[in-house]
Amino acid sequence: MNDNLIRFDWAMKRLLRDKSNYVVLEGFLSTLLEDDLHICRFLESESNQQDADDKFNRADMLVEDSKGRLLIIEVQNNRELDYFHRMLYGVSKTISEYINLGDDYEKVRKFYSINIVYFDLGQGKDYVYHGKTIFRGLHNPDDVLQLSVRQRELFVGKDAGDIFPEYYVLRVNDFDTVAKTPLDEWIQFLKTGRIEEDATAKGLPEAREKLRVDCLPPADRQAYKRDMEALRYQRSVIKTGWYEGRAEGILETARNLKTLGMDTTLIAQATGLSADEIAAL
């Protein structure tokens, strides 16, 4: 097991854009989409900024594959309550960027939004979610609206919803099991930064060789260490703010209970504060 590998989000900005390293990202995307995907090019967009300072706490890229599909890949380290809204905005904005004024609607590209998040996004028991548009009959829910024969000739897909964007959410921190599938092997790498010696998922054997920290040029190695330290500092600041906010909330609750005349013993049981701390309020 190798624990000297570069974090995937940092590699996205510095290494995976190199054509010689496409195989790593192609492996991840092919495994997730269950399709033999080949990267054609990286596109210029707000989603392709390379400087870590441009994105502060996230890394993302915009990729076009050999089938003409566009894929937004984004990594988010810190909690954002409106992250789902940003997913929607990001896809909508990029769709408008990649159709020329006056073009027919058929020029709208097929989009995939792939979101690797390191916080509790929403509520659910799984660690990988897939969302897409489905048009169901109101009177017959089993009736899914499909494309006409002519539309199938012009556009890729069978159902009307196949034209619309699709979303993937990988809640990496919720993966706590043994890797049993190729996708599990990728999730395990994204969470731990390690690749098991027997991992065979497409792209992982190449990642084991190409994403080694000790293979970076000295300047890049120092930049990587600085960025990892900055990320650790960000996590510390956020965690400290959360604890301080929680502590202040507990004190405020204790003050209110004390004002209402509740017994000190009961306040202590409810808040976890000592009798002396309650008396000092």
Image (spheres, helix red, strand yellow):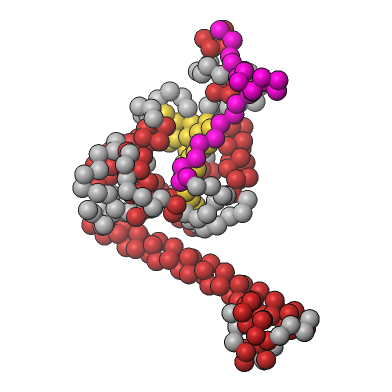
Q: Quadrant of residue 201?
A: top left
Judge whether residue 178 can be spotted in this image: yes
Task: Give the side of residue 3 with respect to residue 126, left or right.
Answer: left
Judge whether residue 8 can be spotted in this image: no
What residue is drawn where x is 58% and y is 75%? 244
What residue is drawn where x is 66% and y is 19%? 140
Task: Give the side of residue 139 with respect to residue 27, left or right.
Answer: right
What residue is drawn where x is 46% and y is 42%? 128
Confirm whether the magenta stretch covers residue 135: yes
User: Which of the two residues, 56 or 142, is positioned nearer the viewer here?
Assistant: 142
User: Which of the two residues, 144 or 31, is positioned nearer the viewer here?
Assistant: 144
Q: Position of residue 273 (x, y in %)?
A: 60, 83
Q: How many marks?
A: 0
Q: Which residues are magenta?
A: 126-149
Q: Quadrant of residue 136?
A: top right
Q: Is residue 92 above or below residue 266?
A: above
Quadrant for the C terminus, please. bottom right
Q: Position of residue 208 (x, y in %)?
A: 24, 47
Q: Position of residue 109 (x, y in %)?
A: 54, 26
Confirm whether the magenta stretch covers residue 15: no
What residue is drawn where x is 64% and y is 23%? 141
Q: Is residue 190 above or below residue 41?
A: below
Q: Overall secondary structure of the magenta stretch?
A: loop
User: Which of the two residues, 166 or 11, is positioned nearer the viewer here?
Assistant: 166
Q: Position of residue 31 (x, y in %)?
A: 36, 35
Task: Give the side of residue 249 with respect to residue 36, left or right.
Answer: right
